[in-house]
Amino acid sequence: MTRWPSRAQSGAPECDVCLVVEGCYPYVPGGVSAWIDWLIRSQPTTTFSIVSLWPRPVATPARYALPDNVSALHHLYLQDFGRRPGRSHLASGSVSLLADTLGEMVTQGGASALASVARRLAGLGPRRDLEAIFNSPAAWQMVERMYARDMPYSSFLHYFWAWRALLGGLFATLETALPRARIYHTISTGYAGLLAARARLETGRPMILTEHGIYTNERRIELLMADWIADNVDKGHALADPRADLRDLWVRAFEAYARTCYEAADEVVTLFEENQRAERRLGADPAKLRIIANGIDVARFAALPRASRQQRPTIALIGRVVPIKDVKTFIAAADLLRREVPDLRALVMGATDEDPVYAGECRDLVRDLGLDGTVELTGNVDIRQRLGEVHVAVLTSLSESQPLVLLEAGAAGVPFVATNVGLCREIVYGRADETPHLGAGGVITGLVDPVGVAEAIGGLLGDETRRQAAGRALEQRVRTYYSSERAASAYSDLYARWAAAEPAPRRFPVAAE
Amino acid sequence: MAGIGFELRRLGRQESLSSLVAAFGHAAVVAAGPWIITILSLAAITLSMEPVIGRDVLATFRAIVIYAFALSLVLAAPVTIVATRLVADALWLRRPEAVRPLLFGAYVLAIASVAPGVLGLVVYFELAAGIALALASMSLVVALIWVALSFCGAVRDYLGVTLSFLIGLVVGVVSTIGAALAGGDAAAMALGFTCGLGVTFIGLTSRVLVTFPAPMPSPEAGILAILGGLGRYRDLALGALLGTAGVWVDKWVFWLSDAGQRVSGGLLHAPIYDSAMFIASLVIVPSLAAFVVRLETGFFERYQRYYGTIRTHGTLEQIEAARVRLAGYTLDNFVLITVTQVGIAAVLILMGPLIIDALSLQFSQIAILRFGALAAVFHFILIVASSMLVFFDQRRLFLLLSAGFLGLNAALTLVTVQLGEDYYGVGYFLATLVTSFLAYHLAVRTFEDLNYLTFIGNNPSIRDAALDRDRRRRRGELAVNTLGRG
């Protein structure tokens, strides 16, 4: 495997900041990618390199043109690991030690666990080929041992594939060469966080984590919705059954990776206070935590036309058609609302190709409820072109961090009905210490509550004065607290501070090349 | 939302394991028997006709039969084994309609493989037209029989096989004798025998067609499928070619050596070696039959249970228990039958002089017969162990083993021929001895490593992905780390 000469960190850095991103920029449009694009453009004098992590090579073209201050885009494919099956010569003693260290890493995690894995791997000798080991009988001995230790009562077939995915990703992360940079900045925990943690331990350069949503929470939701996982452990009625099933394995591993990243990071940035609770629970040192809210370019939205009373009453959910956005609740709310507002138009503005099965279910629901003339899935659109038609914007998401659409709609004076997730409440209602208090910019509802959502929208649509007042309040709040200038200067301060920092001692063995 | 979630859904569904198919290994065992059938049919004609037509015509006739069988067996082996594997795959995928095209394609390609060999023999030995015609027709019909036999084996139609051979052999023996009595020469007798083989071929083919009634849309599809299979399973195809050649190579060495004699028709043979060895190799028949019966009963039950335990989400402990049961049963029975085989060989060794006397062979053949009987024990081990390798998809090992056997048998026989008559048969014996130990070791290791092989080593979704990555890596396409502007 080719290694970058930078492994030993000799020579000049390739760039100022190495951004480590997972499953988004520059290939998937949407919240985090858009934010990354904004971040890079907001720091024109800083040079960036990007490591983009994917399960396997991406087929789609890039959705974002790389700004001029990006010097390199690297890819790392996590599930693309392992050579042709065959023997590898590892003593069984080192196999079991390695298995135990890896077991520690994927169940507990932590910076020292990661360093132990690296030391253990380095201890296998300078000529070890981890990719060959991964498909050798030694790997089988490892999986046997880790299974026996972790979850000996569950489906081995499932465990095996989970093990391969987890360890393949871990190994790929540890084996890849590292771009040289003054600062490593990861935009999530998970494998991106793991790579950043490795960079921190290996180079001693500062590492920053910016977390939008809480990665481990998102993975947990995904796992709860994954119907393919057979619940093979019959837990019966016993309350304290120590046997773990596959979901526990995955959740534990993602938490272990997150813990590793939190421990290694020099600073952990989130968008709002709520996130910090989850971070503290997973061991993030409170002294490292800080908040930088997202901002948007208010001017791009302020001049947009406003929907008038004469136009057909229109509500819009702006977001991808995926389960976590809970589009079905929006459709159900539109169905309820139609009884009061017969000529209602309900738009779902966002890509439908990410989860075609779910999009199909949504279309079926629209048809079954007879909403064909009311609900429309527009696909991906430029919302600046469409905000002028919208009277009330809606988010029914089960999880959000600080949704950009909320700020964008706000900047365009469109009031918002949103679920009580992430930063939505704070943006719509204002912080408790907001002075002067600007008033409600819309309504916050519960999760999966079509009745509540319909009532909230109905209240705004039915009272034009209130609707316009809410739009004005939201616009004012976004202008004051969530402008991109504020966020940009916070990040340039952050980068300036860490770029000047002395490197910390390395905690990783750097393999003799 | 950042993060991949690692395509959790996709990974969960990825349950494909090596699609090893029971029917396939079966056919491998069934196909290991054909050369025994060669000897049985020859023995019948030799015993009945020798007093009538004399040694010389009979020797020519026998040479034609031996050449036809050996040639077709060796040259059709790649097509046969690949067709068998494809049939097994098709049945595993529940696509019975694919079987007829495969049968047709295998027939065409088996003929295409054997025909150049016939032509080569005709030119090399400058055969007369009659003998050339007899050799050609018999070689091609027998080639078709090997193919049809493997299809019947894949569906375990033993009754169909037995009946077809019984009827075909009776017809063949009768028409051969008829041709001889009518004053025909060796070529005429061979054509008569071919008629009987033709009956066997028709019988086997009709069994396959009855079992798979779906009509065949286009004939080319089958040919293309087999050609594709020869590429995909090239280790298997080459292994079968070398393995069957290995069974015959000691005879070829003898024919071409000073011990070889020319029959009146022009073909070479080595009667002193051939006849003793053919008798000795009959010893394998009962053991092989016993092993096939074990496969049919206990082995398959445990084989299915092993893969079933994995598929139905068993724990590793349960999977391991199923593996131990499978390995234990197979190896125990293997050893047990081998011990029986040793007993039979001992009887043959002790009764050597009696047998030589009864068949009016030369006294010097006693030693060859004894070495042959000993070799048969090890050859039995070799056949069973190789079929186990094929069963568990150890195609590369199967190829290496086959190549090793061919090389050893050829080299050692060459040496012993030089050493003189006292050492005749020692080469073949030593080749089977060495290769069988290796084969047994590999089979045992395969059973020990079965979990690893099933999940990683032979798992197509891992192996194929790795091979694909290797290819991309060689072409420099693998973008583990791509530098540059997207």
Image (cartoon, rainbow, N blue to C red):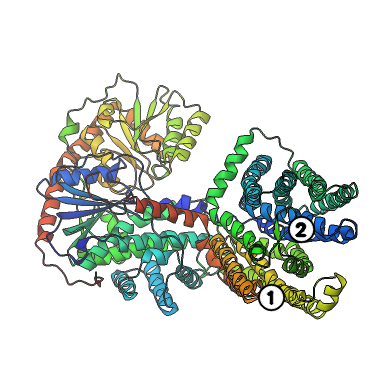
Q: Work out whether residue B180 can be spotted.
A: yes
Side of A488 where B293 appears, left or right: right
Q: CA distance from mark 1 to mark 2?
A: 26 Å
Q: Which residue is mark 2?
A: B38
Q: Nearer the viewer, mark 1 or mark 2?
A: 1
Q: Which residue is mark 1?
A: B421
Pick the residue in front: A417 or A181.
A181
**Label 2 neighbourhood size at 10 Å, few (<14), some (14-19), many (20+)?**
some
Above or below, comparing residue B170 to residue B225 in the picture: below
Side of A503 where A216 appears, left or right: right
- Amino acid of disc 1: Glu
Where, by quadrant of the figure, is residue B405 drawn? bottom right
Pinpoint residue A254: horizontal percent, then vertical percent. 37, 60
Where, by quadrant of the figure, is residue B253 drawn? bottom right
Where, by quadrant of the figure, is residue A331 drawn? top left
Protein chain holding label 2: B
Counting residues from the start of the chain, the first of labels 1 and 2 encountered is 2
Locate the N terminus of chain A and report the quarter of the image it occupies: bottom left
Pick the residue in front: B318 or A274.
B318
Q: Residue at x 69, y 59 (%)?
A: B268
Pinpoint residue A332: horizontal percent, then vertical percent. 46, 35
Q: Are marks 1 and 2 on the same chain?
A: yes
Identify the secondary structure beneath mark 2. helix
Identify the secondary structure beneath mark 1. helix
